[in-house]
Amino acid sequence: MGQRLICCLDAPSALQPPPPLLPVRRKLLLLCIMLFLWLYMFYSCAGSCASVPGLAGRPAAGAGEAAATAGARGEGLQVLSKLLRRAPSSELREEQSAAPDPTSPISSFFNGSGTKKLPQAIIIGVKKGGTRALLEFLRVHPDIRAVGAEPHFFDRNYERGFAWYRDLMPRTLDGQITMEKTPSYFVTKEAPARISAMSKGTKLIVVVRDPVTRAISDYTQTLSKKPDIPTFESLTFKNRTTGLIDTSWSAIQIGIYAKHLENWLLYFPIGQILFVSGERLISDPAGELGRVQDFLGLKRIITDKHFYFNKTKGFPCLKKAEGSSKPHCLGKTKGRTHPNIDREVVQRLREFYRPFNMKFYQMTGHDFGWD
């Protein structure tokens, strides 16, 4: 008994536990914290540099852009906070894809969904020519990203600036084309110079249609919104007795295509403008879409297999719309039944438009067969 006690007294270290070792898991956690702190510092520096001219290669950030950068930093803190709480990888991916500033290179890296760019191609006209159908058909192409609504930037919102305009655009990846369509650009005097100031290389698309039919369609649309407007015949003439056409009425004025085209040719070569036939867009959509795809330098992916003819509406529809497996036709506002117009008035309009049509054929090098 005494020997056992002495042995224990002689070896006090046997009663004390060994010093604890730092667990491997805690070491890894500390390494992760250090790594993401470094990434956050790098991200903050990139965000700061983006607002300094010369460092980022662009003008200093405005109030809206600065707010977006601040929001992006806050998002970065949320990501870091979740990681420190050992957030699942799926949550991390969601945070990464939510970065709000599309112009930031770090943000683009995290969200992996491309960047917003000014459009390389614009459908500039004409109203009631078939621009909505063309845009919907083009959006089936995987290399085309387009704004659904009409931005009206170059005619109504130009004072908002190009940063505002770019923010309306969808995100695109390398090789994809950004597009928008606003038919009123074609008849807006300032639009050609403004688009040229954005980029002289912008490709322009004009969907044209028999100007008489277009005018009646334009009137039909207005009539659906304002049932109490005067008749088509009374709006067409300044004086019905003399047969003098009222060219100040927008429905008539838009169809004088040659006059409007002259303004565009002051800023863009004719080869940079594609003229799509609204009639053939109905009778041969795949053929016209083939021309558009060639013009944009894209592979002909949209073909006959994408369309079927809707007898009720009287024009082609998509078998599968963008991002859907279901057939898609344009809305109820398309394909309205036109009112009956006095044949004499229609004939007088055809005579009025004939010289302008002939000049338009010469300017474009294409006979659209409206006479």
Image: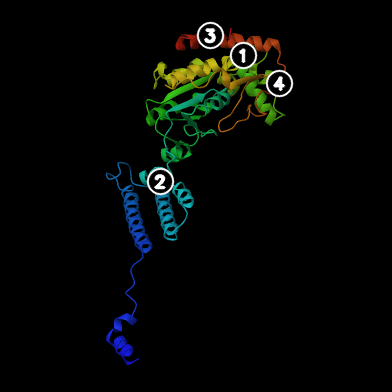
The vertical placement of 39 against 27, above or below, is above
Residue at numbered disc 3? 355
Q: Report if the CB atoms under discs 1 and 3 are less than 8 Å apart.
A: no
Sequence order check, earlier mark of 1 and 3: 1
- Viewer-nearest of labels 2 and 3? 2
Crowding around mark 1 (Cα neighbors within 10 Å: few <14, some 14 to 19, many 20+) is few
- Residue 50: percent from left, percent from top: 33, 47
Q: Label 1 sits on what residue type?
A: Leu
Sequence order check, earlier mark of 2 and 3: 2
Q: Label 3 sits on what residue type?
A: Pro
- Give me the C-alpha separation between circle 3 and circle 4: 35 Å
- Viewer-nearest of labels 2 and 1? 2
Q: In the rendered image, is residue 277 in sight?
A: no
- Viewer-nearest of labels 4 and 1? 4
- Give me the C-alpha separation between circle 4 and circle 1: 37 Å
Residue 23 is marked as: none
The vertical placement of 92 against 328, above or below, is below
Sequence order check, earlier mark of 4 and 1: 1
At x 37%, y 25%, the residue is 201
Q: Label 4 sits on what residue type?
A: Thr
Residue at numbered disc 4? 312
Q: Indicate the colouring scheme.
A: rainbow
- Give me the C-alpha separation between circle 2 and circle 1: 63 Å
Q: Report if the CB atoms under discs 3 and 4 are less than 8 Å apart.
A: no
